[in-house]
Image: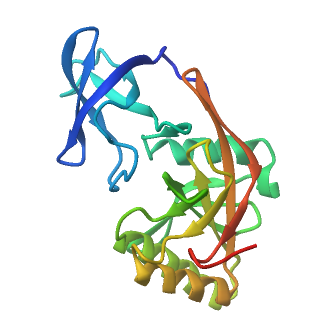
Amino acid sequence: MEFARPLLRTTLLCRYKRFLADMEFDGTEITAHCANPGSMMGMAEPGMTCWISGNDDPKRKLRWSWVLVETGTGTAVVDTGMANRLVAEALKAGFLNAGDFRAEVKISDHTRVDFVLGDGTLLEVKSVTLARDGWGEFPDSVTARGTKHLRELTAAAQAGRPAAMLYLLARDDVDRVRIAADIDPTYAAAFDAARAAGVQMLALGTQITPQGVRTTLPVLVVPSPQARI
């Protein structure tokens, strides 16, 4: 996926209220939208180099959007909404032999799934932005919504429907994924239950530049920080 507009280099001053970030750009202080509901642990330190995108839409409250950050060991995608678009590109290119897949499909009165593949597999996507000790980790904060998604996939698998969770590694300085059980033990338990029920646990790497982001090869995904290979 190539960015529609060239990204601009800035310096982070602070992130606050989760969805706002003040930055220094060309000698001026600006405020950018931060499309990331997580803690952004290790990704939002003052002084970090960031990449932002501009928008001239008069209906938008903020002109700038925070897209990438340089962490000191690599580059990470800040905008978690980009994950589904990247996975859709990978599916179109033949990943998982997805066939004629559909996006944002309602599977119950209160539930939508990110993708339904051509063979009926339910596929949910999560963006992995936390890195510790050489691993990409998910989640970076307690996520009741993420646990709900795992439990829905578990129920589907128990009912005989194929289901999968895909962790998109949205940073380029690690090449394996594990579950951060110390951050959210409830999510970790739901992960273990889902895998035991037959939910496939998948992960994809990414290549990230200021020009664009693309998925690369499948990477290892394991249950918890204690797991070793």
Q: Is residue 42 above or below residue 69?
A: below
Q: Is residue 16 left or right of residue 9?
A: left
Which image quarter holds the N terminus?
top right
**Which residue sits at x=58%, y=20%?**
211
Q: Position of residue 190 (x, y in %)?
A: 50, 84
Q: Is residue 99 left or right of residue 200?
A: right
Q: Position of residue 20 (x, y in %)?
A: 22, 38
Residues 107 and 84: in front is: 84
Q: Position of residue 34 (x, y in %)?
A: 31, 39
**Which residue sits at x=67%, y=67%?**
221
**Which residue sits at x=54%, y=47%?**
83
Residues 160 and 175: in front is: 175
Q: Is residue 136 above or below residue 81?
A: below
Q: Is residue 18 left or right of residue 96?
A: left
Q: Position of residue 89 (x, y in %)?
A: 67, 40
Residues 220 and 72: in front is: 72
